[in-house]
Structure formats: C-alpha cells, structure tokens
Image (cartoon, helix red, strand yellow):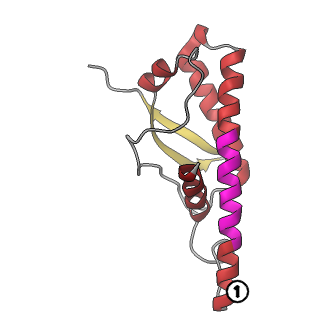
C-alpha cells in the first residue's frame, strides 16, 4: 500500500486526473482480453477490475491528499501550488521502477504468468482523447 500511495502522489505531480484512472483500467482490461483470447472470461474480468479499482482508490486518495498538501504549502509561501498555475501536467511516462515486482497478487486460478509474460507495459500516455491508454510492446521471446 505504501508503494501505491507514493505512486498516487507521483501521479498527482504529473497532472493525472481521477477520470484518467478509469480510462487506464478499461485499456488494461481490453489488452488482457486480447492477450488471453478464449481463456478470458467474466470471472477474470471481474477479478482484475476489482484489483484495478483497489489500486485506483488508493492512488486517487493519495493524490487528493497530495493536492491538499501542495495547496496548503502554496498558501503558506504565498505562491501557487501545482494545479494552480504551478508545475505539473504533461506526458506521464512510467519507465522508473520497471522490473520491480508488484506486491499485489491475483487469485491462484488466474493465468497471471501468461498475462505478465505476454505483455510488456512500456509507457502510459495522456495524449489519447479518452485519457490514458497503454502503449505496449510484445515481450521478447527467446
């Protein structure tokens, strides 16, 4: 959970808005469905949606707390905080931390290894009209 809190604060700094988490979740679910094909089913979708909802909830809450902290500091300093004309926004690239494990585990019956071995998340962009989307590249085989 500490990692998700840090990520939520970082996403705030990058200008990610709460509605973009929904777009991201939809994009990941579509990608998983494409990757798993006939193996994908409603139970998998519901389980992954629950995981992403939990992640989003923690990160959005942390981002809101960060926004409040930045606003308080901005008032104390007499300046503007992020989101009020300060720094922030732009393209969000998630290259840092690549290769580090995620502490969230899916139920044992889910084909997580197949999903993770077949999908390499390279970056997340804010340029899509619907918000975030995944730019993914196939994992290198061999």
Q: Circle 1 is placed at which residue position?
A: 75
In which quarter of the view is residue 32 placed?
top right
**Circle 1: element type:** helix
Residue at point 55% right, 15% down?
36
Q: Is residue 64 magenta?
A: yes
In this picture, which residue range is highlighted in magenta? 54-68
Q: Is residue 112 magenta?
A: no
Residue at point 61% right, 20% down?
33
Q: Is residue 130 visible?
A: no
Q: x, y (%) of residue 45?
A: 68, 22
Residue 56 vertical placement versus 64 (above, below): above
Q: x, y (%) of residue 113?
A: 46, 20
Q: x, y (%) of residue 117?
A: 41, 23
Q: Quadrant of the C terminus?
A: top left
Residue at point 63% right, 28% down?
29
| Extreme residue in the bottom direction | 78
Residue 119 shown left or right of residue 15 in the figure: left
Residue 10 shown left or right of residue 97 in the figure: right
Residue 48 vertical placement versus 56 (above, below): above
| Extreme residue in the left direction | 142
Decide: few, some or many residues near mark 1? Use Cα within 10 Å; few <14, some 14-19, many ≥20. few
The mark tally for this picture is: 1
């Amino acid at each position: 959970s500490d990692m998700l809190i840090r990520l939520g604060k970082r996403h705030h700094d990058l200008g990610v808005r709460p509605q973009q988490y929904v777009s991201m979740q939809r994009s990941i679910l579509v990608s998983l469905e494409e990757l798993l094909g006939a193996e994908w089913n409603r139970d998998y979708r519901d389980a992954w949606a629950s995981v992403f909802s939990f992640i989003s909830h923690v990160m959005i809450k942390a981002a809101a707390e960060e926004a409040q902290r930045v606003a308080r500091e901005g008032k104390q300093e007499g300046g503007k905080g992020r989101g009020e004309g300060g720094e922030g926004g732009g393209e969000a690239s998630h290259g840092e931390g690549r290769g580090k494990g995620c502490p969230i585990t899916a139920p044992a019956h889910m084909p997580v290894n197949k999903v993770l071995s077949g999908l390499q998340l390279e970056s997340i962009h804010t340029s899509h009209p619907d918000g975030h989307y995944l730019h993914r590249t196939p994992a290198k085989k061999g």
